[in-house]
Image (spheres, coloured by chain):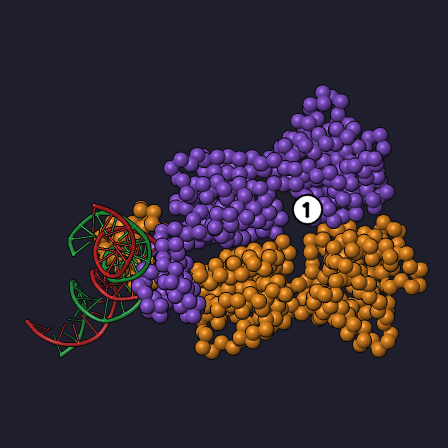
Chain colours: A orange, B purple, C red, D green
Amino acid sequence: MEDVARHAGVALGTVSHVLNHPHKVAPATLEKVRHSIDELGFVPDRRARALAAGTSNVIGFVVVDLSNSFFLDMARGAEQEAQRHGMNVLLANSDVQPEKELVYMHLFNEERVAGILLAPQPTNADDVLQRGRWRSDVVVLNTVPGDPDLCAVTANNELGGYLAARHLIDTGRRSLAFVGGPFSLSPVTDRHRGVERAVAESNGSVRLTTIKTSNVQAADGRKAGRQLAALPANERPDGIVAAADLVALGIVQAFLAERGPRVPEDVSVIGYDNNRAAWDSEISLSTLAQPGEEMGRVATRLLIEEISHPANHEHQRLDLEPTLIVRQSSTRE
Amino acid sequence: MEDVARHAGVALGTVSHVLNHPHKVAPATLEKVRHSIDELGFVPDRRARALAAGTSNVIGFVVVDLSNSFFLDMARGAEQEAQRHGMNVLLANSDVQPEKELVYMHLFNEERVAGILLAPQPTNADDVLQRGRWRSDVVVLNTVPGDPDLCAVTANNELGGYLAARHLIDTGRRSLAFVGGPFSLSPVTDRHRGVERAVAESNGSVRLTTIKTSNVQAADGRKAGRQLAALPANERPDGIVAAADLVALGIVQAFLAERGPRVPEDVSVIGYDNNRAAWDSEISLSTLAQPGEEMGRVATRLLIEEISHPANHEHQRLDLEPTLIVRQSSTRE
DNA sequence: GTGCGCTCTTGAAGCGCTTCAATAGGTGTG
DNA sequence: CACACCTATTGAAGCGCTTCAAGAGCGCAC
């Protein structure tokens, strides 16, 4: 920067002004300095800028599992919103390892980023949050932290389960099955609870059976599907809510392979997550789309609010709604 | 830091030594200072450290598409290797947008990260690389840059195609089909070329037909699969190399749905990429696993070499080999 | 011709750290 | 007891920038 100043024949402070408050600089000087910057290939040092100015415009996002598109959607949303405010998002993939979650939180903290978004492993969240006295503002995604002094943005899985079941009931299904597991995962139990609520509202006109699986992979769905296909026709459910798209996919595949009930003629199937698996399959799957991008956007908005007006910021808990997407697997002519 | 020094009754420089060269500090002082650090909740400022020391220990990784697990694997590999050297990797998802690629390159450049890994959109690579005079060292992944003054690490797709075809030929298949597209993508053409080479080696005892698809999605595979299933049995290939797992998956699904040839009894099918789709499907898919993690590791190793010994660093081009994974879809009893 | 207000520009202080030359306080030797 | 020789500590300089109080230069009105 000193070189630029010398080359342009101005003072150090003027170069800085060209970078930060161009309107305060006379047009001729501006031109001259900018030319020198180009000529010398000067690249300002953000660390020094941030250090001197006491501000940063990068937001750190610690993500539990980037291979899950739900979280990647959050990152996209965060980036969109950050960009609107002239900020950038840097990602750190903790890859489901609690230690790495901590490592990256410390990294961002020491880098004095403007703020941190944390999508933690739920079981690990409070541990991480208490472990450090985080200087940066933090907004938590997809988990409700114990500490009430923190903003949090979550997805309403109970509502998703409800909407899925509601959709099947509204299209005339009367015997539902919920397929998913393990029930130790709160998204699974929440979705199940939502289904139960929708069924309860029917005052007994709709039945519900629950098939627990050990996981939410396609193989689990296929296993459950074979089981269902083997049932006598009058005992078979006519509407299936799967805890995840992969499970729904497995069920449909099993029905096809076993020459079981036809989808959607005999039975409607609806998944959850809006995976690629949901739309890029033989019978496209109805599903509930997670509000991932929106979560990222909203969390970033909260974070930036907190950063820029710490005084009148009120910590919030937002629970965003999933979106029902109807495709072939639940469409009766 | 000044507070810590005062609290511990030592000089500023001593606190710094505790942080950076603990062995140079008397045990008693060390203890005292560390206690004060804890007590005051002091968190060192990395920006200031990096600025003063003129070094950084974060590596920036600009990734074209994090939703593709190939690139995420690279990130994992990069992280592993970086960790071995006490460094950290921060990710920036350019999301297939050329402008964002540039934005993030600039960001990392201005942040004065130790080095940058770039997995660019191939068509955009040279543009990005020339656009800035990057001060940081850069290693390019998955693309060969025009500039010879740069390290690059790629995956050998030609070899992958060769190995796939070779495997089918070695297990007795004599009439192969390559399914994939568009041929404007170099990975597709490279894989096709590899298949051709394997076929050529057979001196005419193996036939090859090529079915071009418009994309590498499951739907494209299903379309091709229906086409193949409709063929009279004696004209049908007995071994299929798909340009991607999703395509292979689509083909198998179509065969199943159309009651076409049985996989693997009548026809072997092999995919590419080792997607979740490959192993979590009804008939598990043989495939070629991309050396993603290895690419990340190797690229990071090269980068760190270049950073630490710029003098005797020779720029390299490494082409890593994919791994054949044999599963059900190409296993004849 | 003097004074006022204005826009531009300047240079020094300081952001939080590292590093290095200098110093202080031992320990061992003759 | 004087001397050299350690090791532990110190404080100032400096990393590349922002910012702010102060100054320079100018036009305008009276």
Q: Residue at x 41, y 43 (%)?
A: B308
Chain letter of the residue beneath label 1 in the structure image: B
Depth check: give the residue in front, B16 or A136.
B16
Question: Residue B299 at x, y = what percent?
Answer: 51, 42
- Circle 1 residue: B275
Q: Amino acid at mark 1?
A: Asn
Q: Residue at x 66, y 27 (%)?
A: B197
Work out whether A222 lies above or below B1: above
Work out whether B191 lies above or below B46: above
Q: From the image, which quarter does the C terminus of chain B lie in?
A: top right
Q: Quadrant of residue D17?
A: bottom left
Question: Residue B196 at x, y = what percent?
Answer: 67, 28
Residue, far top: B203
Q: From the image, which quarter does the N terminus of chain B lie in?
A: bottom left
> Residue B218, can we see it?
no
Q: Residue at x 60, y 57 (%)?
A: A97
Question: Residue A287 at x, y = what percent?
Answer: 73, 61
Depth check: give the residue in front, B280 or D19.
B280
Work out whether A115 lies above or below B146: below
Q: Residue at x 56, y 74 (%)?
A: A147
Identify the secondary structure beneath mark 1.
Answer: loop
Work out whether A53 lies above or below C20: below
> Residue B200, can we see it?
yes
Count all numbered tags in the image, as a single digit.
1
* Image side of residue D25 versus residue A150, left or right: left
Depth check: give the residue in front, B309 or B33.
B33
Q: Residues within 10 Å of mark 1 (few under 14, many from 20)?
A: many
